[in-house]
Image: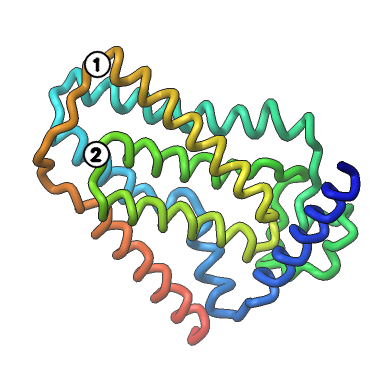
Amino acid sequence: MTELLQWLTELDNQILLTVNGWHSPFFDYFMKAYSGKVVWVPMYAAILYVIVRNFHWRTSLFCMIAVALTITFADQMGATVIRPLVERLRPANPDNPISEMVHIVDGYRGGRYGFPSCHAANTFGLAFFILFLFRKRWLSCYMMIWAALTSYSRMYLGVHYLGDLLAGMLLGALGAWLMYQLFVRVSRYERPSLVSRLYLPVHVGILTMLSMAIYAALRLIL
């Protein structure tokens, strides 16, 4: 078991340093912006709009509570329960032996511990909940790609290992499944066959990414 854990740790280090090593000034700006939280508020608002537009107000209220509980469960289980038990240093933490080999973007190193990744838990929690809620192929694909790119940005920035992100993804999926089951039982939700303005979050999300790319390009020029 000890040899297996050592092998997994070494593999995690190699993957992290490889991904973190594929850096450039453009993607430094882009990934730092992509990893932010406030920048995604327009997409969150678009998701909320689709829910309110298509569901009865009572169902919409229960749905919003379930989404909030999904993110709270994923975030608090990761940050408050698991991290203090595992105490795995982030790659960029100065006390980590590999930190000297990690490319640091704009001085950002994150907190002390990083297992599991709360970014991965929160974004995949939302992505899985939307998947369970609508079961529409292209919206589900977009949400999963969005969450996966968020996780990638955390490795790029050197603040999480792949293992941190995979654990966060599983935690988010678990939270989404539990809260979706609770939501269905409480609200007696029946999935609609037709959903108005279903792809608005996709369009808003893509425009947000394009805005980040323009921002990164302008930072290089200016």
Q: Residues within 10 Å of mark 1 (few under 14, many from 20)?
A: some
- Whichever of callouts 1 and 2 sits on the residue coming sooner in the sequence is 2
**Which mark, residue 134?**
2
Q: Kindly report the distance in space between the C-alpha atoms of the residues bearing marks 1 and 2.
A: 15 Å
Q: Mark 2 belongs to which amino acid?
A: Phe
| Nearer-the-camera pick, 22 or 216 | 22
Q: Residue at x 35, y 70 (%)?
A: 210
**Which mark, residue 151?**
none
Which residue reaches farthest top? Answer: 186
Quadrant hosting residue 57: top left
**Which mark, residue 187?**
1
Which residue reaches farthest bottom? Answer: 221
Q: Is residue 125 left or right of residue 202?
A: right
Q: How many marks?
A: 2
Q: Position of residue 18 (x, y in %)?
A: 70, 72
Q: Position of residue 62 (x, y in %)?
A: 28, 20
Q: Residues within 10 Å of mark 2 (few under 14, many from 20)?
A: some
Q: Mark 1 belongs to which amino acid?
A: Ser
Q: Residue at x 26, y 55 (%)?
A: 138
Image coloring type: rainbow
Quadrant hosting residue 88: top right
Task: Check the picture and name the quadrant holding the N terminus.
Answer: top right
Q: Residue at x 61, y 49 (%)?
A: 165
Q: Is residue 110 left or right of residue 133?
A: right
Whether residue 23 is situated above or below residue 192 in the rendered picture: below
Q: Is residue 97 left or right of residue 52?
A: right
Under circle 1, the secondary element is helix
Under circle 2, the secondary element is helix
